[in-house]
Image (tube, rainbow, N blue to C red):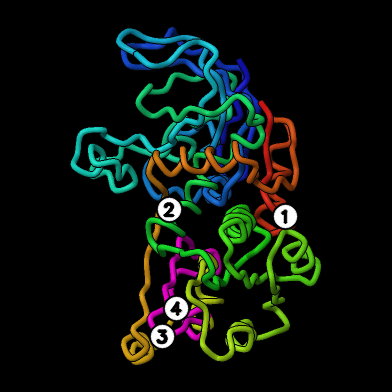
Amino acid sequence: MRALRLHGDRDLRIDEIPAPPPPGAGEVQLRIHAIALNHIDVWGWRGMAFAKRELPICVGVEAAGEITAIGAGVTGWAVGDHVAPYGALTCGKCAACTSGRDNLCEDVSGIMGFHVDGFAREFCNVQARLMVRVPKSITWEDAACAAVTFSTVEHMLFDNARLQPGETILVHAAGSGIGTVAIRVAKAMGCIVIATAGSDEKCAQALALGADHAVNYSTKNFSSVARRVTGKRGVDVVFEHVGADTWGGSLLSLRMGGRLVTCGSTSGVSAETNLMMLFQRQLHIFGSFGAAMRNIADGLAKMEAGLLPVLDTVVPMDRFSEGLDRLETRRVFGKIIVTI
């Protein structure tokens, strides 16, 4: 079968490798139809692995596929079922896993596509307990955005920031995969959305997507706009994933008691924080990493109801590196999908 494997820094190749054996006990075999690209794919492509891994490694962290075979002891699944696999190899036994907080697992053995072989291959065997059912009305391309993109937004906005209908939210990097989803999700529940982006073109796209206001952060002070739009009160929630470049302004944009939720640091991992402002204004900062499996299911329910991801580009496997280059250089609005 064909597999897209990383052989070294920025060295991606389509290899012919043996197909997997029949699924073992507790496993299902998947035919992968589509994968969605994320910044973690770019990090891996650059050689930025945070743990030891052996090369070559099959890439692809977020995917959708169908079950083609079932191993012994697996119940509740059938050949032909559509699924979105959870990419973190959790233990399934610790207190976090057994209470439905999968992303807080105490003994994760790796992330597929980053530490161990991922989903950019025609077939793979995965533990059945890591499957989330995909309604068959959802396309493969949209379903591929469930396991990381939609679930990350669900976890950030609802588990952490506790976003409420009618609140005002500042969404950074409106052209990113999670930024576009956050705009759609927030607008669908009646929130006022202020979006930021690095170009006038992306600001126009954010407005077309449903944002009430859009700020080109390369030419305007977004915190000033946020305070003006809210009558100097400040926003209820900041959806942060840019990092150092926007951190200070994000805190300045918040109202008294406002909530900032962050899941990324693409512009740098260190930023100064005004501690006096933090405690005097009683701000809340939430770190958010990954998502629980139930967040994937919640995102898929929204897709089934018509709230779909924004797809920038759909490319075949042999153009995977083009997609990574577009993502790395930020020439993207929405998600890049690779069909297998």
Question: Could you say where residue 103 lies in the image, as x and y percent from the top left?
Answer: 34, 46
Closer to us: mark 1 or mark 4?
A: 1
Amino acid carrying mark 4 in the image: Ala
Vertical placement of residue 144 versus 162, above or below: above
Q: Is residue 26 magenta?
A: no
What is the magenta range?
250-271
Residue that label 3 marks: 256
Question: Could you say where residue 173 lies in the image, as x and y percent from the top left?
Answer: 62, 65
Tell me if label 1 and label 4 are in contact, CB under 8 Å.
no
Residue at image x 59%, y 34%? 143
Is tag 2's residue or tag 4's residue first in the polypeptide sequence? 2
Question: Could you say where residue 26 lies in the image, as x and y percent from the top left?
Answer: 32, 16
Label of residue 271 in the image: 4
Q: CA distance from mark 1 to mark 4?
A: 26 Å
Label 2: which secondary element: helix
Residue at image x 38%, y 22%? 128
Tell me if label 2 and label 1 are in contact, CB under 8 Å.
no
Tell me if label 4 and label 3 are in contact, CB under 8 Å.
no
Vertical placement of residue 304 versus 330, above or below: above
Number of other residues with Cα within 10 Å of mark 1, as a class: few under 14, some 14 to 19, many 20 or more: some
Question: Could you say where residue 289 lies in the image, as x and y percent from the top left?
Answer: 40, 54
Number of other residues with Cα within 10 Å of mark 2, as a class: few under 14, some 14 to 19, many 20 or more: many
Closer to us: mark 3 or mark 1?
A: 3
Residue that label 2 marks: 155
Label of residue 332 in the image: 1
Q: CA distance from mark 4 to mark 3?
A: 21 Å
Amino acid carrying mark 3 in the image: Met
